[in-house]
Image: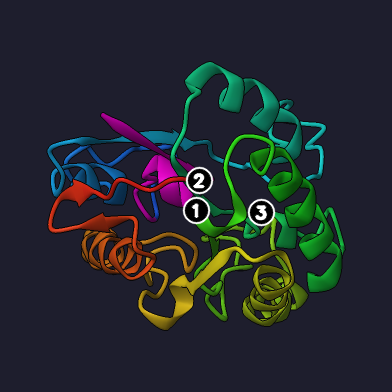
Amino acid sequence: MKSILAFGDSNTWGFVPGTRQMERYPWEVRWTGILQKKYEDVRIIEEGLCGRTTAFEDDLRPGRRGASALPLILESHRPLDAAIIMLGTNDCKSVYSVSANTIGKGMSLCLDEIEKYIPPQNILLVSPIFLGEDVWRDDKDPEFGKQSVAVSRELKHVYRQIAGERGTEFLAASDYVIASDADSEHMDEGGHSRFADVIYEKLGDMGLIWKGEFKNNKF
């Protein structure tokens, strides 16, 4: 049995758009669950957490710093054959007030940790979906501002460059999925289904998985 770590935030956790009580899509609806059902000899390890950032501390919700969480998670789930990492949306919040390039530095810290356990070519770096233009409204998520929307759109370019420099694989979720109108931040059920299909095809293109089987790679 081969193992793939899926490390992310609320869009990996399965947050239902527009819900105030942190409602969660059931396992079979989340993109990680859909992806899991496509394989017989691969285990998708779902590690999503609402509010998770690449490297920034949330004083109101401790433990959201991805770079700090990764060492224990990676050790806990070892051995790992591959990893998918999709973070950056929460880094765009107004409280952090950072640029896309600074978020990229946080992502690099996360990749530093992952590469201690997994070779770069078996890591898929995913830039997140874009924040909707009105995500900052009081009835949506006022933790974001208008500048947050612009920063979220710049992550695709920054992450692509990081992947090229480090030798990791890259995929832009925003090329395939958009945020739900309900909150301009999270994927709806259709988005999770589409994203699972895209990840499945990408893993095949990476030469790791083909027709439901994990290839016998020698790292």
Give, as a single range, the part of the protein colored magenta.
1-17
Say what secondary structure mark 3 lies in: helix
Q: Report x, y in % for residue 35.
A: 23, 50
Nearest to N terminus: mark 1 or mark 3:
3
- Which residue is depicted at the point 47% across and 77% down? 174
Quarter the N terminus occupies:
top left
The verdict on residue 68 being magenta is no
Labels 1 & 3 near each other (Cβ < 8 A)? no
The label nearer to you, 1 versus 3, is 1
The disc at residue 122 is: 1
Q: Which residue lies furthest to the top in this view?
A: 76
**What distance separates the C-alpha of mark 2 from that of mark 3?**
33 Å
Q: Position of residue 39 (x, y in %)?
A: 16, 44
Residue on which the image places disc 2: 219
Mark 1 or mark 2: whose residue is earlier in sequence? 1
Task: State whether residue 182 appears in this view.
Answer: yes
Mark on residue 90? 3
- Disc 3 residue type (three-letter): Asn
Q: Which of marks 2 and 3 is nearer the N terminus?
A: 3
- Secondary structure beneath dot 1 equals helix
210 or 202, nearer to the observer: 210
Q: Toward which corner of the image does residue 105 lie, by quadrant?
A: bottom right
Q: What residue type is labelled 1?
A: Asn
Q: Where is residue 8 in the image (x, y as percent from the top left)?
A: 53, 46
Q: Give the amino acid at mark 2.
A: Phe
